[in-house]
Image (cartoon, rainbow, N blue to C red):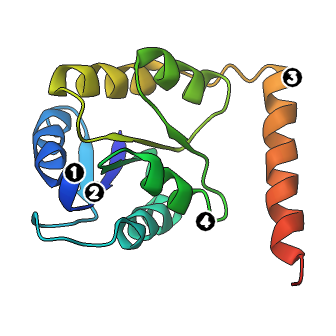
């Protein structure tokens, strides 16, 4: 798999460990940050999400203090379906029901939990049942229609 990963300063150490873990069986592209110096998570969420299409990634991973800010920023980018996950069940449903192409989570979690969540997401296939597919199409329509709305 080709996986993109990015973090802010609070997720930097976790990101380094996760890259080492994922590189054993995957191609991982690091979109930054490159240190623990304070940065704005929005910039790195944008870099990774734009890389989804440009670099033909299978999916992306975003890590910040809570995972919330990264997921909010990511979901502002057209074509991104980012799920903020907290456990393996969230990771499963993010993919199986919602076909998320990006996951985000808190850097405060243990590496064991993080590895389990990422593994579950990678092992899960989108179920592509009519009700799930219909909901995703509605989200895409909402994204398209709202981007045309003038203030």
Mark 2 vs 3, N-terminal side: 2
How far apart are the two marked residues, 2 and 3, measured between alpha carbons?
34 Å
Q: Which residue is mark 4?
A: 77
Q: Residue at x 56, y 22 (%)?
A: 125
* Front tag of 4 and 3: 4
Q: Which residue is mark 3?
A: 130
Q: How many marks?
A: 4
- Residue nearest the observer in this picture, 23 or 131: 131
Q: Which residue is mark 2?
A: 7
Mark 3 vs 1, N-terminal side: 1
Mark seen at residue 35: none
Q: What residue occupies the far top of the structure in this picture?
A: 89
Give the structural element (helix, strand or loop) at label 1: helix
How far apart are the two marked residues, 4 and 3, measured between alpha carbons?
25 Å
Q: Residue at x 86, y 22 (%)?
A: 131
- Locate the N terminus and report the quarter of the image it occupies: top left
């Amino acid at each position: 798999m080709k996986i993109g990963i990015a973090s802010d300063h609070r997720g930097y150490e976790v990101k380094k460990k996760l890259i080492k873990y994922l590189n054993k069986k995957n191609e991982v592209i690091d979109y930054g940050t490159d240190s623990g110096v304070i940065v704005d998570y929005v910039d790195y969420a944008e870099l990774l999400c734009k890389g989804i299409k440009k670099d033909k990634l299978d999916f992306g991973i975003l890590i910040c203090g809570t995972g919330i800010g990264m997921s909010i920023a990511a979901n502002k980018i057209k074509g991104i379906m980012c799920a903020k996950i907290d456990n393996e069940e969230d990771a499963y449903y993010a993919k199986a029901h919602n076909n998320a192409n990006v996951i985000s989570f808190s850097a405060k979690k243990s590496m064991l939990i993080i590895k389990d969540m990422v593994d579950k997401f990678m092992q899960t296939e989108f179920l592509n049942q009519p009700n799930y597919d219909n909901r995703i199409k509605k989200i895409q329509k909402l994204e398209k229609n709202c981007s045309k709305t003038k203030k």
